Image (tube, rainbow, N blue to C red):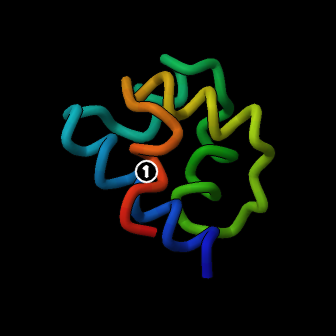
C-alpha cells in the first residue's frame, strides 16, 4: 500500500539524517504523533504535508517517491 511504502521511505531518509521522530517533526512544524502515524502508514497524508516532509528531508518530491 502506498501509505505504508511512503512511511517506510520517510523513516529511512529521516534516520539517515540522524533525527528522532520528535526532532524531525519539530523541525518541520508538525505534531509528533501525526508524523509518527505518517511513518507508520496510517495516514492518507495531504500533498502539502508531503511537500513539507520532503523539504525537511532536503529531497525533491520525486526523490521522496523514488522506488515506490
The image quadrant that residue 21 belongs to is top left
- Residue that sits furthest to the bottom in the current view: 1
**Quadrant (top left, top right, bottom left, bottom right) of the N terminus:** bottom right
Q: Nearer the viewer, residue 58 or 60?
A: 60
- Image coordinates for residue 38, horizontal then vertical, percent: 62, 55
The extreme front residue here reads 62
How many numbered callouts?
1
Q: Residue at x 19, y 41 (%)?
A: 16
Q: Nearer the viewer, residue 39 or 62?
A: 62
Q: Quick one: label 1, few (<14), some, or many (20+) residues within 10 Å?
A: many
The residue indicated by pointer 1 is: 10
Residue 35 image offset from top left, x and y in percent: 60, 44
Query: Which of the pair 35/3 is nearer the observer?
Result: 3
Q: Is residue 49 left or right of residue 28?
A: right
The answer to whether residue 28 is above or below residue 57 is: above
| Rendered location of residue 39, percent (x, y) | 52, 57
Nearer-the-camera pick, 32 or 48: 48
In this rendering, the answer to whether 29 lies above or below 47 is above
Callout 1: SS:
helix
Q: Position of residue 56 (x, y in %)?
A: 46, 23
Q: Residue at the location (55% across, 73% down)?
A: 4
Residue at 49 percent of width and 17 percent of height:
27
Q: Residue at x 22, y 32 (%)?
A: 17
Amino acid at each position: 500500500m502506498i501509505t505504508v511504502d511512503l512511511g517506510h521511505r520517510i523513516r529511512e531518509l529521516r534516520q539517515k539524517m540522524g533525527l528522532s521522530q520528535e526532532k524531525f517533526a519539530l523541525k518541520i512544524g508538525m505534531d509528533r504523533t501525526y508524523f509518527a502515524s505518517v511513518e507508520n502508514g496510517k495516514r492518507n497524508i495531504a500533498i502539502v504535508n508531503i511537500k513539507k516532509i520532503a523539504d525537511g528531508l532536503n529531497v525533491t518530491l520525486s526523490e521522496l517517491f523514488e522506488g515506490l
